[in-house]
Image: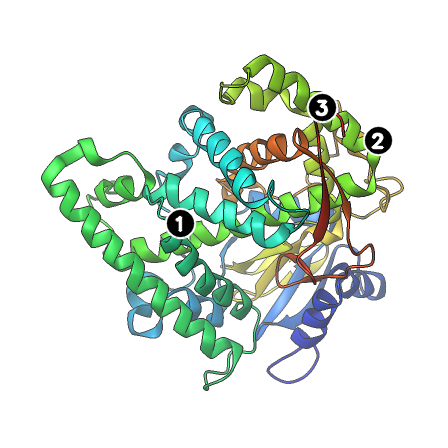
Amino acid sequence: MGWPIIGETLEFALSCQGGNPGRFLNDRMNKYSPQVFKTSLLEANMAVMCGPSGNKFLFSNEDKLVVSWWQRSMKKILCFPSVFNETLTGDKFRPPTFLPEFLKPEALQHYIATMDSMASEHIELNWSPNREVLVFPLARKYSFALAFRLFMSIDDPEYVEMISHPFQILNEGFLSVPIDIPGTTFNWALKASKFIHNELLAIIRKRKMELEQKGDSAARDLLSHMLLASDENCYVKSEMEISTQVICLLFATHHTTSSVITFILKYLAEFPDVYSKVLKEQKEIAKSKGPEGFLKWDDIQKMKYTWNVANETMRLTPPVQGTFREAITDITYAGFTIPRGWKMHWNVNTTHRDPKYFPDPEKFNPSRFEGKGPQPFTFVPFGGGPRMCPGREYARAQVLAFIHHVVTRFKWEKVDPCEKVAYNPSPIPSKGFPIRLQPLQNGSI
């Protein structure tokens, strides 16, 4: 169980910062049990569920035996203490019920042209004039701007750039030691959260006025839907609840997708044969849409090999390591009892590199995802069950639209072949992943 209070959190964090988040888990699975082991993480007694059976158990028992759990420091960062009780009641924070509807393929079809045009414009402005670029910050800049455009109809690049920096500080504070004194990472994250909330509250109040004046005709984005929606009891969420949910959504959609984009480009630079196959697929799609046309939903569906590459990227370099649950009753699993109130954790690293499910697991091999693909509950970058990430189709469309434009315009090589990667909690290249661009002319260098 580790040290008093902090438990084994430091060892867990060090394995992530060292670029090998699976080491902490594999060491304990080998020493104790490949199915479940106990430890102390994030100030809580923790049962870590391992393998596909552990994933299946947690995913299928949501709101029956377990509920989502948010660590105390995470909740304080997401909503500063003065409104803590208003926004997060206990540990049962939930996204708005209509969010999956808003992010379903039927709704996403209307966003593809915007994703396409913004990706093209972003690359023209930030990539084409340069011989070398830093991929990670640029991918983050694009995904953040896209989220603001689609979710809140904000397209002022200076404003989006201004508010993106506090989001980076907020992210760094999630796994920091929760000591709120000036100069600590946690303290900076709290200040960043308060700043972001104040900015979002101003946007929310302005939008409410517009809705009062224009009615439902103004409800063309996610924010307007959130302000107009009510549950089955006619309860309308407060401004602070909506602000908190917008922060969660912006964080989840922009940080993870920018990570996936970055590491797809990394693997394409390392494997020219994979790059050639992706280029061939994307050239065919570019030819069919024409020089003045926009990508359509059908075009996204045709990017099968490119999505296999994205899946293999998420297997080897997952953008999310896992999430936490809380036992709401005593649970018996694999011959052990997990007491009510204990926290539970599932983590992608208990299956993604296991040779039982992915032969030669360190090899980058997109063909793993052809046909039926991996066994159930072994490949879980988006979680599973009722709490599976509702934005997975949004992420897929955003990533593929961006890769389409990069691949059809450039070939590239890594500037630093030995660049290290740390996890906090998503994978971050230590130098931002600098690449050297080689523009393509009519599909060739």
Q: Position of residue 372 (x, y in %)?
A: 73, 25
SS at badge 1: helix
Q: Position of residue 392 (x, y in %)?
A: 54, 38
Examine the rendering and report whether any part of residue 372 can be seen.
no
The first of marks 3 and 1 along the sequence is 1
The first of marks 2 and 1 along the sequence is 1
Q: In the image, is residue 389 above or below residue 16?
A: above
Q: How busy is the neighbourhood of tag 2: few (under 14 within 10 Å), some, or many (20 plus)?
A: few
Q: Is residue 240 left or right of residue 14?
A: left
Per the image, the residue denoted by label 1 is: 157
Which is more foreground, mark 2 or mark 1? Answer: 1
Q: Nearer the viewer, residue 60 or 271?
A: 271
| Colour setup of the view | rainbow
SS at badge 3: loop
Q: In the image, is residue 80 above or below residue 235?
A: below
* C-alpha gap between disc 3 and disc 2: 15 Å
At x 76% / y 39%, what residue is drawn? Answer: 268
Per the image, the residue denoted by label 2 is: 273
At x 19% / y 31%, what residue is drawn? Answer: 217
Q: Is residue 62 left or right of residue 162?
A: right
Examine the rendering and report whether any part of residue 91 can be seen.
yes
The first of marks 3 and 2 along the sequence is 2
Q: How busy is the neighbourhood of tag 1: few (under 14 within 10 Å), some, or many (20 plus)?
A: few
SS at badge 2: helix
Q: In the image, is residue 322 above or below residue 118?
A: below
* C-alpha gap between disc 2 and disc 1: 37 Å
